[in-house]
Image: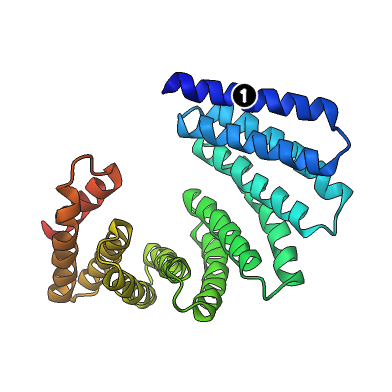
Amino acid sequence: MKLLRHTSQHVLLAGAVVLAGCASTNAKAQRNLSGIYDQVGKMHEAQGDLKAAHTAYQEALTIRKTLATDDPTNAKAQRDLSVSHIKVGSMYEAQGDLKAALTAYQDALTIGKRLATNDPTNAKAQRDLFVSYNKVGNIYRAKGDLKAALTPYQDSLAIAKTLATNASTNARAQRDLSVSYDQVGSIYQAQGDLKAALTAFQEGLAIAETLATIDPTNAGAVVDLCISRYNVGRVLRATGQDAAGRSQLHAARDQLAPLLSRAGAPLLWKRLGAAIGGELDK
């Protein structure tokens, strides 16, 4: 299997070399070339080779910068560039370079704001902007700057509300909104504003409950629900509502248990289970 993956990478790179040599001034061919570098980057990333993935994503970014500069009114070229900034930023983030990651995410955010402003009814452009705000917020939070993190999280929440309202049956849009409430709530909690945190967490929980009810066999939806219950339960206990808090934690533990019994349960699930158990032991 590893040999097949390496072979696929070599084939893609060979194609990239051919395209680069034969169509250096052809915008369509250059866009295809950037796509090939992206595919190679994804393969390296899936194998855990972040350095190689970063190099491939950087190659794609270089091409897309040129294409976006050459055609500044081309929304597709601008979005491609924004996506490349996000991918390069994720590599910096994964390798611990938060300063470089923040710069990349802010570059994506700048483009995203412009595209969303130019086409305010385009749900895809709005969600891209939502993602960029989240990425920026994540970095500020990782750096310990809670005040700076709250602003982009609130901006992403505002977008998520609109998208969820406009697509009330779209599970992804609803999940985005639930996660946004959780992110805002986590910042309020870290800042000591437990009342605001509880309000945000409960908003997220209501959505997570609905999604898990609609699709009870969806493990991701169940895990999201357990996370929301855990968040609400902790804050309830911290505000003196111990019985209500423990009720949420017990429900989270019971709903997560069947997933944890599966062979090869992801580490994230196990960590969540341990966190819930630890909170109940207090």
Image spot of residue 203 (x, y percent): 37, 77
Q: Quadrant of residue 194?
A: bottom left
Q: Which of the two residues, 118 or 236, is positioned nearer the viewer here?
A: 118
Q: Amino acid at mark 1?
A: Val
Image spot of residue 29 (x, y percent): 79, 39
Image spot of residue 61 (x, y percent): 71, 40
Mark 1, Cα crowd under 10 Å, few <14 / some 14-19 / many 20+, is few
- Please tell me whether mark 1 sits on a helix, a strand or a loop: helix
As drawn, is 45 to the left or to the right of 121?
left
x 89%, y 36%: residue: 25
Visible in this render: residue 215? yes
32 over 142 or under it: above or below? above
Visible in this render: residue 101? no
Where, quadrant-wise, is the N terminus in this rendering? top left
As drawn, is 210 to the left or to the right of 78?
left
163 over 269 or under it: above or below? below
Q: Quadrant of residue 158?
A: bottom right
x 73%, y 36%: residue: 33
265 over 46 or under it: above or below? below
Where, quadrant-wise, is the C terminus in this rendering? bottom left
Q: Say which residue label 1 marks.
A: 11
x 66%, y 25%: residue: 13
Q: Which of the two residues, 267 or 123, is positioned nearer the viewer here?
A: 123
